[in-house]
Amino acid sequence: LPTVFLHLRIRGVAVGLFDPITRRIRQVLDVPETLPALRRFFVTTTFDAALVMLGILIGSAFSSASNYRIVVVTIITTSIALGISTGVSIFEAESLEQAIRLKEIEKALLISLEDTEIRKIARWSAFIIAATNFLSPILTGLILLAPFLLLPPNQLRDAAWISVGLTMAILFVTGVVSGRSGERNPVVQGLRLIVVGVLAFILLYWVESLIF
């Protein structure tokens, strides 16, 4: 019984520690501009990451000199690099936009918003949008990496084909999200992105065959 009470107390303390963070996230998501920006950047970042990973698959796993370690390491390092690139660039862009917006509000109200709740929410908004887009390429890379980790190294080409299929699935889901947020047919939008992915695969595969 004492162990149960201790567990509940620790859990209560942990929940209490995260309460301010979850409350702040809710406040940020309640801002009308946050969710549209979050969706917009997430869709574009995921689409870019999927096509970049498609190029890596063709250039490494489908080449005549394919190597298991090179494929795995390249996917991991590229995912992290894309995450850092998109996360930092979007944070800087959003921070700039938020700063401009706050200056316009200050001019209109003739007051300073320094150390106010509005400025804090603006900073958190930029951070959440950037963090989401930092994780997007990494999550995409992990999904496409899974077949190489689950199949033995001597089935490298099979794993690559499965990853290509997963890439098309990611593009379809991205199109569905884009279609729903833009009040367009989600299935049609998803199929459009699959067509783009297939055309990109054919082009990149052709380029790879010319070089090797």
Image (spheres, rainbow, N blue to C red):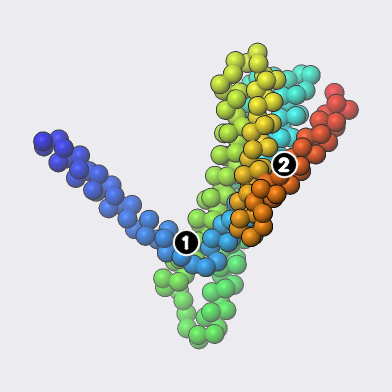
**Residue highlighted by disc 2:** 194
**Residue highlighted by disc 1:** 29
Residue 18 picture location, percent across and down: 33, 52
Q: Which quarter shows the C terminus? A: top right
Q: For residue 195, say whether it is visible.
A: yes
Looking at the rendered structure, the kind of residue marked 2 is: Ile
Looking at the rendered structure, the kind of residue marked 1 is: Leu
Q: Give the vertical position of 59 relative to 29 (above or below).
A: above
Q: Which quarter shows the N terminus? A: top left
Q: Secondary structure at mark 2?
A: helix
Image check: 62 left or right of 167?
right
Q: Could you tell me how far apart the alpha carbons at marks 1 and 2 are, in whole angstroms?
A: 30 Å
Q: Residue at x 60, y 51 (%)?
A: 177
Residue 118 picture location, percent across and down: 45, 71
- Name the outermost residue toward the left: 1
Depth check: 207 or 160 in front? Answer: 160
Q: Are marks 1 and 2 in contact (CB under 8 Å)?
A: no
Q: Residue at x 83, y 36 (%)?
A: 203
Depth check: 122 or 47 in front? Answer: 47
Q: Secondary structure at mark 1?
A: helix
Residue 74 picture location, percent across and down: 65, 30
